[in-house]
Structure formats: structure tokens, C-alpha cells
Image: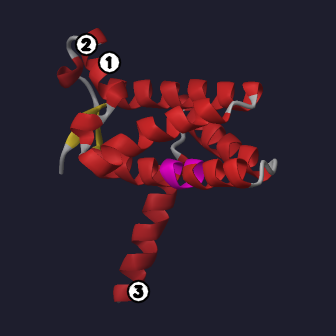
Amino acid sequence: MKEIPKSYVRANQYVMVILTLFSILLQNVSLLALTLLIVLLPLLFGPKANITFKVAKMLIKDAYNEETEAAELQRFNQIIAASLLGIAFIVLVTTGHWFGWVLVGMVTVAASVALLGFCVGCFMYFQFKKIKYEMKK
């Protein structure tokens, strides 16, 4: 299983919190679109397209000698974030309904909680795998 240095994952979470929080506070759909693009690029083109990882790699020199996280979990979390941000973007562009900002807020809260030590996406992933395993019995 591929691994990602924890500092890269944390950098990604910080970027997610900052961009989503500012898009909510400023009610700026363009900033939301930028956030969505940053989340979608690695999903579409692989981890080498992750802008946040590239910047973190330049700033953090000895990242590969530290704790790591599974790339599979990072991808799962990115899929959840991309889905919520994508739906939010569509809702906000087409209707301007406040529910779009609620979805963005969910991503902000999940990334913030992850920075504090609890990964909501990881918990969901574990539950998904557990259910899948139970169904195989």
C-alpha cells in the first residue's frame, strides 16, 4: 500500500480549511471553484497532480522520514470532499441556495476535525470496509 507523509496530508487539510472557510465567509463561489479544482486534480490525474503536496514538498525537506498515512484513505477523503464541494458548487451556481454553503461547511468542519486528530472520512472508510466484510460472511 502506498503511503503519504503525514505533513503533506496535514498541509492538504490546512489548505482545505482555509479555502473553504474563506469561501463561506466571503460568499465567494470563485474561491469555492478554486478549492474544488485543487481537490479534483489529484483524483483525476493522480497524487503527482496534488498542488498542495507539491508546495509542501518544497517547504518540508525531510518528510519521507516521518509518520505516514495510507494513500487509499487520502483518496477516499478526497472523493468525499470533491463530491460535497462539487454538489455545493452546482447548487450555488444554479440556484444560489444557502444549502450549498452548508455542504461547504461540512467539508470545513471535517478538515478542521481531522487537524485536531479525528478523521471523519477514515471512520466512514472503516465502517464501509466493516460492512463489506460482514456481507461476505
Asked whether the beta carbons under mark 1 and mark 2 sit within 8 Å of each other, the answer is: yes
Whether residue 5 appears in magenta in the rendering, the answer is: no
Q: Position of residue 62 (x, y in %)?
A: 20, 14
Asked whether the beta carbons under mark 3 and mark 1 sit within 8 Å of each other, the answer is: no
N-terminal of the pair, mark 3 or mark 2, is: 2
Q: Position of residue 39 (x, y in %)?
A: 43, 41
**Can you identify the residue that label 3 sits on?**
135
**Residue 2 sits above or below residue 132 on the image:** above
Quadrant location of the C terminus? bottom left
| Label 3 crowd bin: few (<14), some (14–19), many (20+), radius 10 Å | few
Foreground mark, 3 or 2, reads: 2
**Can you identify the residue that label 2 sits on?**
58
- Disc 3 residue type? Met
**Can you identify the residue that label 1 sits on?**
55
| Label 2 crowd bin: few (<14), some (14–19), many (20+), radius 10 Å | few
**Quadrant in the rendering for residue 4:** top left
